Amino acid sequence: MQEPLHQQGSQRRKAREQMQSRDAMSPQDSKAAGAEAMEGHKAQSHNQGRMEPTAPPLPPPSPPPTGPPEYPRPRLIFHTQLAHGSPTGRIHGFTNVKELYAKIADVFSISPSEILFCTLNSYKVDMQKLLGGQIGLEDFIFAHVRGETKEVEVTKTEDALGLTITDNGAGYAFIKRIKEGSTIDRLKTVCVGDHIEAINDQSIVGCRHYEVAKMLKEQPRGIPFTLRLVGPKRAFDMIGMRTKAPKSNEGKIVNGRETLRLRSRGSSSVQEVNEIEEQATMKVDDLLESYMGIRDLELATTIVEAGKDKKNPDDFAESLDSVLGDFAFPDVFLFDVWGAIGDVKNGKI
């Protein structure tokens, strides 16, 4: 059934109004609407094709270092024997005297406490060859072990007994020198190389040499006291044990070769022997004997190292106190040491 004419006209009017309204939209509005539609389309496309983010690329490797490559120093191996006779052993991997004794003891299946001291390149009780704080890389090590124990009664007739004491770096003090004509020199059973194990039955094992020297110095005159001594074991009875080391060049190391420097603290190091420092060390070792009754090349070397770069005795005393404060060196000793180091530097000795 056909709609009435007035209804058809109304519908046509509404259609014309809608078309007019759309045609009346401003160009800006039309553009915005188109842009909005386009952005919506782009967003939809982007979301459909988006991928997960990836990690940033690694930086390029560092260029190789310039210069010759560094090679590890070869392992230092030393040959050793027991001084009274044994097969030859090989030791390595030690940084101080205690570790050295432990290595030697392990090779020969003995206790480290059996070793009294070591000499270099000589099986004899030769204090010129005594192992101190340095070992030449070609040196042969002879270990002197405990032998006969003996007790000696001593009576002081003067302040000094005539003994020079040193220690092995592992708790044993022993006799390094006997002064000719002294109280001890008259006791023919006391020998260079004897370990002082006790004074009046009081064990001094573990005491440093300067402590033992002080104990002996404090023994009163005219009152007998007893020394318990342990001599090094000997292969043949005809080898003379009563020796006196000369004062000059004691423990001298041949110049121009490398040595392994053993340290009480820290690791060992390989060093070239310095002639000036060596001369200063010998002079300081002489002063240690004069003032304290001890000889100790390692101690003397440490003292020289503490003073070689100092400009005045006050700086030297402060440096020495920081590394060797336990010794409580007297001021007069420090000034004499400072003078000796200066004389060697200036070529006066």
Image (cartoon, grey):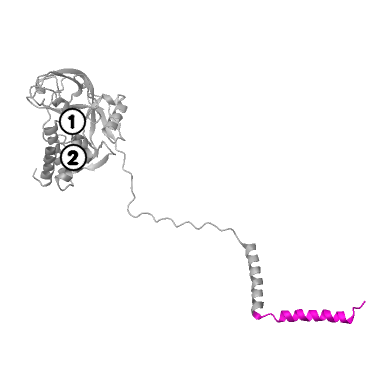
- What label does residue 210 carry, if any? 1
Q: Where is residue 106 in the image (x, y as percent from the top left)?
A: 32, 27
Residues under numbered marks 2 and 1 in contact, where contact means CB atoms less than 8 Å apart:
no
Is 236 displayed left or right of 34 in the figure? left
Q: What stretch is highlighted in magenta?
A: 1-27
State the residue in front, 160 or 56. Answer: 160
State the residue in front, 45 or 272. Answer: 45
Query: SS for tag 2?
Result: helix
* Type of amino acid at the residue the image marks with label 1: Tyr
* Type of amino acid at the residue the image marks with label 2: Ile
**Placement of the N terminus among the 4 image quadrants:** bottom right
Is 12 displayed left or right of 181 in the figure? right
Q: Quadrant of residue 130?
A: top left
Q: In this view, does 6 lie above or below 246?
A: below
- What label does residue 65 carry, if any? none
Residue at left offset 16%, top offset 30%: 127
CA distance separating discs 2 and 1: 15 Å
Q: In this view, does 264 lie above or below 186?
A: below
Residue behind mark 2: 303
- Residue 335 belongs to magenta span: no
**Placement of the C terminus among the 4 image quadrants:** top left
Residue at left offset 25%, top offset 41%: 270
Is 268 displayed left or right of 344 in the figure? right
State the residue in front, 89 or 61. Answer: 61
Query: SS for tag 1?
Result: helix
Q: Position of residue 115 (x, y in %)?
A: 25, 26
Q: Where is residue 297 in the image (x, y as percent from the top left)?
A: 18, 35
Q: Quadrant of residue 348?
A: top left
Q: Which badge, 2 or 1, comes first in the chain's sequence?
A: 1
Q: Is residue 242 above or below residue 59?
A: above
Residue at left offset 12%, top offset 44%: 344
